[in-house]
Amino acid sequence: MKTNIFRLTSVIAAVLVFLLAAGHVFAGDDQEFNRILNLGMADLTQESLALLDSKYPDEDWDAVKFPQYVFTSDSVEAGYMIAVKEPELLKKFKCYCFCDTMGHADLSWCFLKKGKLKKGFDDHGSDCNICYGQAMMALLWQEAGFSAERMTLGFEKKFAKLIEKFGDK
């Protein structure tokens, strides 16, 4: 009888330790997710450019032959660099500037014509801080290991006022 109670107590203690440890992991995930969500544009740009440099250290960006409008700011440049290297990531998300009314199917179209590098660049992303901001958040969240579904929830939270005003088509 004492052995069974001891085993049951041990199992309950092990489960509690596991749940507490898991809670700390998820709380850490939430903290990092929200940190990225709430970054200002300057910090978002700095972290994104640093990540691009570390992920693609030997990339010859001059060979990409970006149009001149890409070089209007570091933020714009980061957005286009992400589109060139991570188009499949951007294809997972709608753009919350509601450029779907212009025919854009997803976030990649803001930077690449019809979402394809071989078709050339679209200048829309150069004038829209929502577009390049979303691209940078997506890159940082992906690097932190968050799923596309979680990122979408983050975008919906970030752009809730725009969704409320313009709808979620």
Image: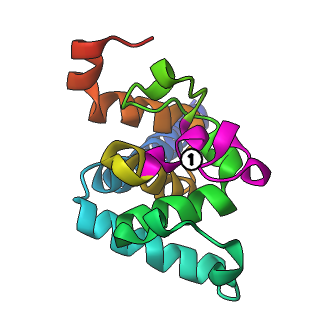
Residue lying at 42% horizontally and 29% vertically, measured from the top left: 153
Q: How is the image coloured?
A: rainbow
Q: Quadrant of residue 65?
A: bottom right
Name the quadrant of the N terminus: top right
Q: Is residue 54 left or right of residue 73?
A: right
Residue receiving disc 1: 122
User: Who is closer to the viewer here, 80 or 91?
Assistant: 80
**What span is colored magenta in the figure?**
107-125
Q: Residue at x 28, y 14 (%)?
A: 166
> Up-down: is 142 above or below 124?
below
Could you classify mark 1 by the number of other residues whose Cα lies within 10 Å: few (under 14), some (14-19), or many (20 or more)?
many
* Kind of residue sitting beneath label 1: Asp
Residue 92 in the figure: left or right of residue 101:
right
Which of 73/6 is in front? 73
In the rendered view, tell whether residue 83 sits above or below residue 160.
below
Provide the major secondary structure of the magenta segment.
helix
